[in-house]
Image: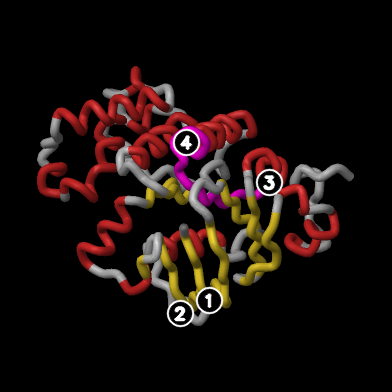
């Protein structure tokens, strides 16, 4: 279980990104975080694995205080948490297989990986991960030769190499068209249901939220303004989260 307790984040320039954010995520949930751009979604996800350092508050992962961890303990926590980014974060000139193998860095360190020395077991696992996302035939292709949807599937395969218990997906479909968006989220849904991997995913469009989320948290100006089931977000709640000028049709609500 993940517990976020009274989390605050203030950037050095004085920008307050998160204010007193608290919630729990049970094992096996597909939690979606929604809100306008700048509401704090990305900051929240990156605070969970401490890619961004919180200013105040606690994050507990299976009872371990992530915010107090350092060194080997923090590395051990991060091994259990896969991360998927909006812009894929692949090494574009490297092969697809090499990018997937990078998911093992938390286990083998950088020295061997920089020399291209990977165990046969790791290579076999990488091929299986690519098979899982339907890209085994692209293993030797350069990452920048792939489409956006394919690159995001490589990013999912890379996350799988960590054997994660939790996947953080930071607006993973923001740069993809609707068909590809569903394709990527279906892979995450499959991992959530079949592998029991907890997923925390930030999204913009409510049609996707209604389709994939088991529970929703909404942020506005860095504060939690809604926690509940996706079907509880009606027009009134939608306007509370997104503002009076929000375009409802784009959000998947009927006019």
Upstream in the sequence, badge 2 or badge 3? 2
Q: CA distance from mark 1 to mark 4?
A: 30 Å
Q: Position of residue 125 (x, y in %)?
A: 26, 30
Q: Are marks 3 and 1 in contact (CB under 8 Å)?
A: no
Residue hosting label 2:
56
- Against 208, residue 49 (above or below) is below
Upstream in the sequence, badge 1 or badge 4? 1
Mark closer to the observer (3, 1): 1
Please report the residue visible at 44 percent of the width from the left and 78 percent of the height from the top: 55
Upstream in the sequence, badge 2 or badge 1? 1
Mark 2 crowdedness (10 Å alpha carbons): few <14, some 14-19, many ≥20 = some
Q: CA distance from mark 3 to mark 1?
A: 27 Å
Please report the residue visible at 57 percent of the width from the left and 71 percent of the height from the top: 21
Upstream in the sequence, badge 2 or badge 4? 2
Residue closest to the far bottom: 14
| Numbered range of the magenta stretch | 191-204
Q: Secondary structure at mark 3?
A: loop
Of 154 and 22, nearer the camera is 22
Q: Is residue 198 magenta?
A: yes
Residue hosting label 4:
191
Quarter of the view holding residue 139:
top left
Mark closer to the observer (2, 1): 1
Q: Are marks 2 and 1 in contact (CB under 8 Å)?
A: yes
Name the quarter where the C terminus is drawn.
top right
Q: Position of residue 244 (x, y in %)?
A: 83, 62
Quarter of the view holding residue 93:
top left
Upstream in the sequence, badge 3 or badge 1? 1
Q: Are marks 2 and 3 in contact (CB under 8 Å)?
A: no
Q: CA distance from mark 2 to mark 1?
A: 7 Å
């Amino acid at each position: 279980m993940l517990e976020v307790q009274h989390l605050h984040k203030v950037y050095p320039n004085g920008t307050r990104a998160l204010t007193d954010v608290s919630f729990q995520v049970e094992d096996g949930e597909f939690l979606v975080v929604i809100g306008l751009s700048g509401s704090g979604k990305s900051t929240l996800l990156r605070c969970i694995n401490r890619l961004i350092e919180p200013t105040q508050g606690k994050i507990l992962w299976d009872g371990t205080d992530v915010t107090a961890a350092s060194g080997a303990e923090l590395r051990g926590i991060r091994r259990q948490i896969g991360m998927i980014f909006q812009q894929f974060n692949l090494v574009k000139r490297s092969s697809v297989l090499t990018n997937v193998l990078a998911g093992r860095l938390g286990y083998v360190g950088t020295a061997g990986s920089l020399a291209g020395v990977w165990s046969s077991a790791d290579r076999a696992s990488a091929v299986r991960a690519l098979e899982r996302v339907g890209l085994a035939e692209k293993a030797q292709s350069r990452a920048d030769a792939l489409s956006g949807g394919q690159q995001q599937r490589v990013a999912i395969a890379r996350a799988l190499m960590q054997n994660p218990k939790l996947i953080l997906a930071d607006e993973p479909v923001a740069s993809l068209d609707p068909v590809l968006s569903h394709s990527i989220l279906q892979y995450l849904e499959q991992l959530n249901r079949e592998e029991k991997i907890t997923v925390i995913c930030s999204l913009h469009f409510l049609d996707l939220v209604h389709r994939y989320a088991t529970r929703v948290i909404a942020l506005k100006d860095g504060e939690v303004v809604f926690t509940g089931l996706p079907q509880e977000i009606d027009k009134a709640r939608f306007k509370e989260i997104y503002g009076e000028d929000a375009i409802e049709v784009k959000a998947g609500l009927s006019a």
